[in-house]
Image: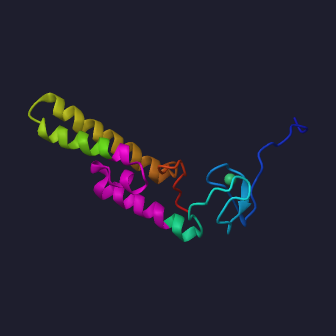
Amino acid sequence: MSDVQETKVEKKENEKYCSSCGAIIKKEAVICPKCGVQQKNMDGDNDVSKKWLTTLLLCIFLGTIGGHNFYVGKTKKGILMLVLLVAGIVFAAAIVGFAGIALVFVLWVVDLIKILSGTFTDGAGNVIKKE
Ligand SMILES: [Zn+2]
């Protein structure tokens, strides 16, 4: 087993993955030298931490209306939760309304667990971690 090649290339401390092609590039790089795509501003661990905290707080306080999904760029999911909740309240007199509210609640709890465990992703597919 010892001669199995490690294919995964680890990035160094001063490097990051290109947001487009995934190549290892310098952390300060604004444009990827491989594919030429402009990098999203992800510099500084404080920014990442802040983003995680903002996402968590939005999920806790505005999660049922999809607040955290709008924040991270998951607009479609945010709208879906908002529509489901509003429709659920409107049709609450009928059983179907409660189904909508229950579904929003499930989506909300799942997102909250994902954020807390550091597996929640933004609209571009980047994982939002605590650190
Ligand atoms: Zn690239």
Residue at the image point whose x is 35% and y is 59% from the top = 58
Q: Kindly indicate the quadrant of the structure image that contains residue 29.
A: bottom right
Residue 127 drawn at (x, y percent): 54, 51
Give me the residue at 22% from left, 32% from top. Answer: 99
In this view, the residue in front, 88 or 39, is: 39
**Location of the C terminus (image quadrant):** bottom right
Give the mark count: 0
Percent of width and height locating residue 94:
11, 30
Indicate whether residue 77 is drawn in magenta.
Answer: yes
Q: Residue 25's spot in the image, x, y percent?
A: 73, 60
Q: Quadrant of the N terminus?
A: top right
Q: Residue furthest front?
A: 36
Residue found at x 29% / y 56%: 62
Tell me if 13 is positioned left or right of 1 in this view: left
User: Image quadrant of residue 61?
Assistant: bottom left
Q: Residue furthest left?
A: 93
Task: Please report the bounds of the magenta region as a residue range.
Answer: 50-78
Left or right? Give the position of 118 relative to 59. Answer: right
Looking at the image, is 28 positioned above or below residue 88?
below
Say which residue appears at 25% left-offset and 37% top-offset: 102
Residue 16 position in % (x across, y down): 68, 60
> Which residue occupies the extreme right position in the image?
3
Q: In this image, 40 relative to 32: left or right?
A: left
Q: Is residue 61 one of those drawn in magenta?
A: yes
Q: What secondary structure prevails in the magenta region?
A: helix
The colour scheme is rainbow
